[in-house]
Image (cartoon, coloured by chain):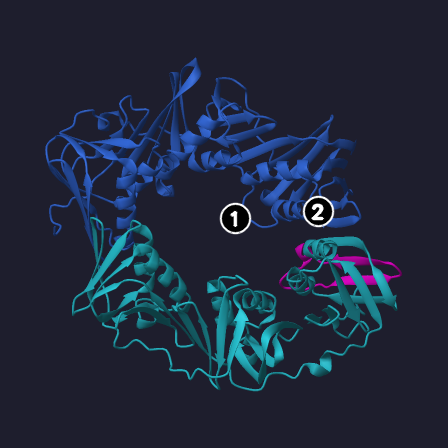
Chain colours: A cyan, B blue
């Protein structure tokens, strides 16, 4: 193979596909980027077998062929060479020469015959969404994905298509996050469970521009994302996602309306008193038009007060402050509504039409010293 | 003790003294900041027994006294409270209340009786230097301090006062860095060896402004730095520093003049091919008006060319590219002069009046495959 591409093209391509390079192995084929040059197309591919990314870059093919190069080394070389054309040329044994201006590097590549190609996906069930929306919806839900591999389904997010809505749900046993996004078209009902890691990596390579779009294709075992000259394919998690509808009751006994930043700052401070080994709750004492917040642990204690608007009963309830912080951080509104029933039922933070909904289980404080 | 200071004052003070908080211990007196309020002065002190920092902050003393607070927790609390006045009040048992607006935190402090105070230093042998100069001279030499505790003297830097010059020297067995700075006054001849860690930490709290000054006081066992409302005291390393003068010969057989950035970029690229376990040299082949650079290791190989101005003989010589990179990074000039004698004698990078001088030992390349 012999190709000529600009440093810029190589760098852009490498940065995109690197998200699917396995970091756990070294000098294994999974830690490589496959470069293929055939029929006028130069393609870079990385595939850790769960997640695969392919992107096309611009350049000239002098001799067609392919080579697999260790991703980290190749990307470091590309980063450190001048902004100019790069000639990449391979020998049959895998020896690869990288030339740019007066610089000439040689590294050993692999023929790439053992590189696991991306699965061929039928492009059906297409859904189109703006890159901005997809990136945002991931950011707003990814934090409540579980990292416990024993509960495989909890390490993924449920993506549901309902008419012209995309509903994204994640949960980890202590909390549930749900976001709804309006799509430009109406689609047939579908749902898939996508690994959290896939969503995290794809959110890193999305432009985040509202004017740029992504096509998603859902199949039984895979999800395929297509945007600009990039294709991302991920395995789906198999199984039936948790039925959360029964938990999302709209009944409540207490409704609070609170300035979000004020509450967030207070809760964030209180996390200083949470010890990993002994998770003491922050206790909310809701009385009339104010809320007292208290936390007390081996480390120390903190008390704070926030003025609130309240509808319904007074209440004393405790939470892991970190869970409230995670949810409040991704809500853009200035004021939030929090709905509660009693000290042992989950609270729900949501807007009126539930475009966002964060459910958080309380910590029983009946025995705590208050 | 009861004092009132602004969040800003506390934060500034804590950020300064934290540099001398021991990070190796937890909840030990060495991980604490001592706050003392007597005679109208509020002083924060940290002391890891090698390095001690004391700074005064502004505020009101309601009840004089002192308390030692765990540095990390106290600094996190101060960071996360609102920009307003903070009331710090202690009880006899060490319980400390921190109040700001409606927020009330309690943490356990220590009476501070076991806190090791800074040594009392006679303020003699005063030298005045701009904060900019001191910060720069540390940055320009600190990288060649050895981290090998077996050679204790090499973990420090030699500070020499000669007339109106401060000469700073560091070395690690493979290289020597020397910087000379002009002072505004002439002083008697003095020299001390200051631990590298002290210099690193002090360079972090210096403003770096040419108009701000530091007073340094040298004693037999300590160096004291005084600037604004801060005092830094460090133990000195005891012993006789290496005599390097015989190595700094101005004889040479080959002199190169090279564009610094071009050389730096090339050397930086070549470090990609250096393996920790098998340090292959970059080989410089100096011939006529050009220099070929070559490196070859298990990882791969690289060749590059740089145009040079040469005076004297052609030469083939090898170096650890990282050592050249470290030196070139802290030289501000656009062009550098490199002086060499032969393939086994050290090279010296210096300007005409030796305001900077970097000596680097070569790697024998006679047996290398070129």
In the rendered structure, find residue A274 and report the number of the disc placed on it. none
The structure residue drawn at horizontal position 58% and vertical position 43%, both measured from the top left corner, is B30
Q: Residue B310, located in which quarter of the rendered image?
A: top left
Is B142 located above or below residue A126 in the figure? above
SS for dot 1: loop
Is A290 within the magenta? yes
Question: Residue B190: image x %, image y %?
Answer: 40, 19
- Residue occupying the point 70% across, 82% down: A245
Q: Residue at x 53, y 34 (%)?
A: B205
Q: Quadrant of residue B260?
A: top left
* On screen, residue A167 above or below A10: below
- Would you say residue B279 is visible in this rendering? yes
Q: Are marks 2 and 1 in contact (CB under 8 Å)?
A: no
| Residues marked 2 and 1, same chain | yes
Q: Is residue A166 left or right of residue A99?
A: right
Q: Measured along the vertical axis of the image, is residue A105 above or below residue B355?
A: below
Q: Nearer the viewer, residue B81 or B92?
A: B81
For the point 32% across and 60% down, the residue is: A10
- Does residue B237 appear anywhere in the picture? no
User: Regarding mark 2 in the picture, which secondary structure is present there?
Assistant: loop
Q: Is residue B311 magenta?
A: no
Residue with the mark numbered 1: B24
- Chain name for mark 2: B
Picture quadrant of residue A314: bottom right
User: The numbered mark 1 sits on a residue in which chain?
Assistant: B
Q: Is residue B338 left or right of residue A243?
A: left
Mark pair 2, 1: CA separation:
27 Å
Question: Which quarter shows the N terminus of chain B?
Answer: top right
x, y percent for residue B286: 14, 39
Q: x%, y% of residue A195?
A: 51, 75
User: Which residue carries the number 2 mark?
Assistant: B81
Question: In the rendered structure, which segment of residues is drawn in magenta?
Answer: A271-297
């Amino acid at each position: 193979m012999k190709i000529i591409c600009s440093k810029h093209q190589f760098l852009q391509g490498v940065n995109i596909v690197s998200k699917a390079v396995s970091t756990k192995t070294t000098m294994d084929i999974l830690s490589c980027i496959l470069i293929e040059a055939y029929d006028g197309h130069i393609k870079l591919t990385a595939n850790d077998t769960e997640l695969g990314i392919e992107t096309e870059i611009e350049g000239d093919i002098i001799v067609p062929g392919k080579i697999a190069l260790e991703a980290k080394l190749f990307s470091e070389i590309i980063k450190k060479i001048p902004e100019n054309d790069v000639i990449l040329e391979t020998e049959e044994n895998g020896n690869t020469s990288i030339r740019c201006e007066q610089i000439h590097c040689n590294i050993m590549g692999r023929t790439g015959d053992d590189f696991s190609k991306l699965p061929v996906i039928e492009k059906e069930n297409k859904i189109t969404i703006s890159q901005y929306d997809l990136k945002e919806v991931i950011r707003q839900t990814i934090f409540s994905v579980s990292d416990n591999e024993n509960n495989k389904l909890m390490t993924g997010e449920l993506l549901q298509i309902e008419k012209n809505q995309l509903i994204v749900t994640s949960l980890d046993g202590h909390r549930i996050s749900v976001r709804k996004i309006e799509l430009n078209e109406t689609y047939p009902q579908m749902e898939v469970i996508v690994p959290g890691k896939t969503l995290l990596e794809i959110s890193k390579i999305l432009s985040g521009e509202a004017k740029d779009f992504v096509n998603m294709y859902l199949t039984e075992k895979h999800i395929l994302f297509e945007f600009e000259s990039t294709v991302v394919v991920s395995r789906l998690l198999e199984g039936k996602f948790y039925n959360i509808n029964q938990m999302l009751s709209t009944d409540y006994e207490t409704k609070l309306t609170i300035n979000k930043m004020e509450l967030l700052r207070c809760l964030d401070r209180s996390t200083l008193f949470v010890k990993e080994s002994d998770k003491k709750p922050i206790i909310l004492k809701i009385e009339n038009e104010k809320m007292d917040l208290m936390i007390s642990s081996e480390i120390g204690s903190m008390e704070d007060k926030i003025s609130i608007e309240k509808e319904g009963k007074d209440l004393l309830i405790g939470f892991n402050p970190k869970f409230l912080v995670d949810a409040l951080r991704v809500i853009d509104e200035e004021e939030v509504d929090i709905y509660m029933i009693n000290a042992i039922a989950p609270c729900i933070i949501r807007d009126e039409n539930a475009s966002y909904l964060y459910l958080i289980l309380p910590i029983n404080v009946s025995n705590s010293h208050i």
